[in-house]
Image: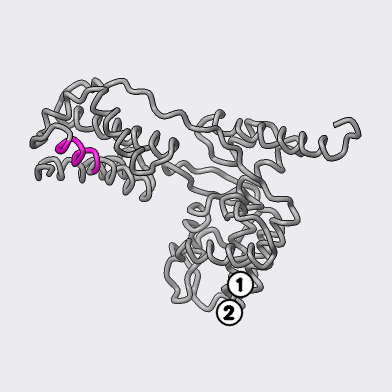
Amino acid sequence: MEQPSLADLAARFGAHLAHDRRRSAHTVRAYVATAHRFLHFMHEHRGEQIGRYALLTIQPTDLRGFLARRRGEGLGAASAARELSAVRAFLKFAAEDSGEQPQLPRTRAPRRPRTLPRPASPGDAMALAEDAGEAALQPWVGARDLAILLLLYGAGLRMAEALSLTARVLPLGPTLRVVGKRAKPRVVPLVPAAREAIEAYVRDCPWPLKGDVPLFVGVRGGPLNPDLVRRAVQGARRRLGLPDTLTPHALRHSFATHLLARGADLRSLQELLGHASLSSTQIYTGVDAAHLLDVYRHAHPRA
């Protein structure tokens, strides 16, 4: 198995990702877990203890063998590509930590299918949010879930962004300052429906919402577990007969697709979504084209 020095290296790799690269806690956990998997694989692959020097001599065949092992374990192309990215980041960190110039082996990542998000209709998005709110056992919990889902659809927030908001955003104004991935801040407009839902939740919430306390809290007043919101959405989806693809994150996709369909330009959409590059936003042009093609096929007599 990996030597203690390499286990320590993996731990410091995680600290580097969290503090220097400002990666999310989820990404840090995933990348560190991949680093440990790769070290374990290399120990078995070479049949000997792996030292720090061995990480500086990794060959393309080593990476291909690791990916083949992971694919054989059922990993899809997209997940395998992320796994390769994590290994490369770890090897780069190991080289720099040793004072060496990183010379990463070249290996082509598995080709990932370019999947398009599946947006909900405005009616389905609103029905989902309202049903999730109405089904809660406590009225204030229902008001909370409604407010969160309207933020995802009305402002294009990620779930993590919504749950990272603190009570310092109160009182609400026409816009909301959000901290996204890699601690990148942005300002998003707050539509009246979302603002009213948040204000109703704040009035009903039995816990004091002040200062750095999370804006959205659980039944005991602590940080809200996102799985609870996902379960509320799952129940609403089942009751309404909506497709399984209508997840909380799909509400963000719907926000982007509907804005684009109504004439929003890609640069503005990039800022609203908090995408680091325009290429991440351009996928929504495919979503809109797919929607228009679907409308054409159903409406045109010659289609």
Residue under label 1, please give it: 142
- Rendering quarter of residue 102: top left
Callout 2 secondary element: loop
Percent of width and height locating residue 110: 41, 29
Q: Judge the density around disc 2: few (<14), some (14-19), many (≥20) Cα neighbours within 10 Å.
A: few
- The outermost residue toward the front is 72
Q: Identify the residue at horizontal 32%, vertical 33% (top origin).
A: 68
Q: Is residue 223 above or below residue 17?
A: below
Percent of width and height locating residue 160: 48, 53
Residue under label 2, please give it: 138
Quadrant of the image containing the C terminus: top right
Percent of width and height locating residue 88: 30, 30
Q: Judge the density around disc 1: few (<14), some (14-19), many (≥20) Cα neighbours within 10 Å.
A: many
Amino acid at dot 1: Gly
41 is within the stretch colored magenta: yes
Which one is in front, 100 or 20?
100
Q: Is residue 104 above or below residue 117?
A: above
Residues shaded magenta = 37-44
Asked whether disc 2 touches disc 1, contact meaning CB atoms under 8 Å apart, the reply is yes
294 is within the stretch colored magenta: no
